Image (cartoon, rainbow, N blue to C red):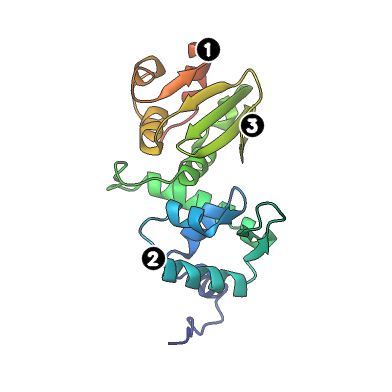
Amino acid sequence: MARTGYQEGCIAAHALDLIGDRWALLVVRELMLGPRRFGALRAGLPGLSANVLSQRLGDLEAAALLTRRLLPDPARVQVYALTEAGLALWPVLRALCLWGARQPGHDPTLFISPTALMLSMRAMCARDRAAAHLVEMRLGDDLFTIRTAPGQFVVVRGAAEAGALRFSGGTNAMAAAVYGPSPLRDTARGLIGFEGDLAEGQAFIDLFALR
């Protein structure tokens, strides 16, 4: 059945016509830190069938929120990437993180994708208290570099250079280490892996709270 939308002149309704379908914003979430293959998107959205993912990607492309392109040789695979308009949805995702953290019923034991954790940290970081930190986080097959400074939090995909604090572990375990009450000296004894100065690592972790 063709999508009819809300048939309203309201600009909020217009926005929902573009991104209001189920899973649409979560597909955007998984692309917020850079282009991804179809299989990587499926891995980050395990509750989403391949058919529905294909449909959402087509809808978002039709709305000019993402593009698809073929990587050059030797990879020669198709990836999906957000357009400028798609990337401009970050404040929407950030607002949802901040609002959702204040609502009861959140279950942190459910699946969390690596990208989702990075974006939640980007949303929840206390930038006003941030010192200069260089951090590498390995979450399964995903690798991220985080840089903080007073007023700043930047996360990109890829390995960090020498001298970085290095965290590793499962995504849900890392979320528990970042947001939970236990100090790093305890969570680094089996829950997650950590390499670097423990005091600096604790100062970095202290920047995040589900508030």
Residue 211: horizontal and vertical position, in percent?
Answer: 41, 37
**Nearest to the observer: residue 76 or residue 208:** 76
User: What crowding class fits label 2: few (fewer than 14 Cα within 10 Å), some (14-19), or many (20 or more)?
Assistant: few
Q: Nearer the viewer, mark 1 or mark 2?
A: 2
SS at mark 1 in the image? loop
Q: Residue furthest front?
A: 74
Q: Residue at x 56, y 56 (%)?
A: 37
Q: Nearer the viewer, mark 2 or mark 3?
A: 2
**Mark 1: amino acid:** Asp
- Tell whether 185 sits left or right of 65: left
Q: Nearer the viewer, mark 3 or mark 1?
A: 1
**Mark 2: amino acid:** Ser
**Nearest to the observer: residue 38 or residue 151:** 38
Residue 151: mark in rendering: 3
Q: Are marks 3 and 1 in contact (CB under 8 Å)?
A: no
**Mark 3: amino acid:** Gly
* Cα distance in 3D space between marks 3 and 1: 22 Å
Q: Which residue is labeled 1 in the image?
A: 197
**Nearest to the observer: residue 167 or residue 103:** 167
Mark sitting earlier along the chain (1/2)? 2
- Tell whether 63 sits left or right of 107: right
Q: Residue at x 36, y 21 (%)?
A: 187
* Cα distance in 3D space between marks 1 and 2: 43 Å
Taking 30 as reference, is 198 above or below it?
above
SS at mark 3 in the image? loop
Q: Residue furthest right?
A: 72
Taking 33 as reference, is 172 above or below it?
above
Mark sitting earlier along the chain (2/3)? 2
Residue 106: mark in rendering: none
Q: Residue at x 65, y 70 (%)?
A: 64
- Tell whether 136 sits left or right of 50: right
Q: Which residue is labeled 2 in the image?
A: 49
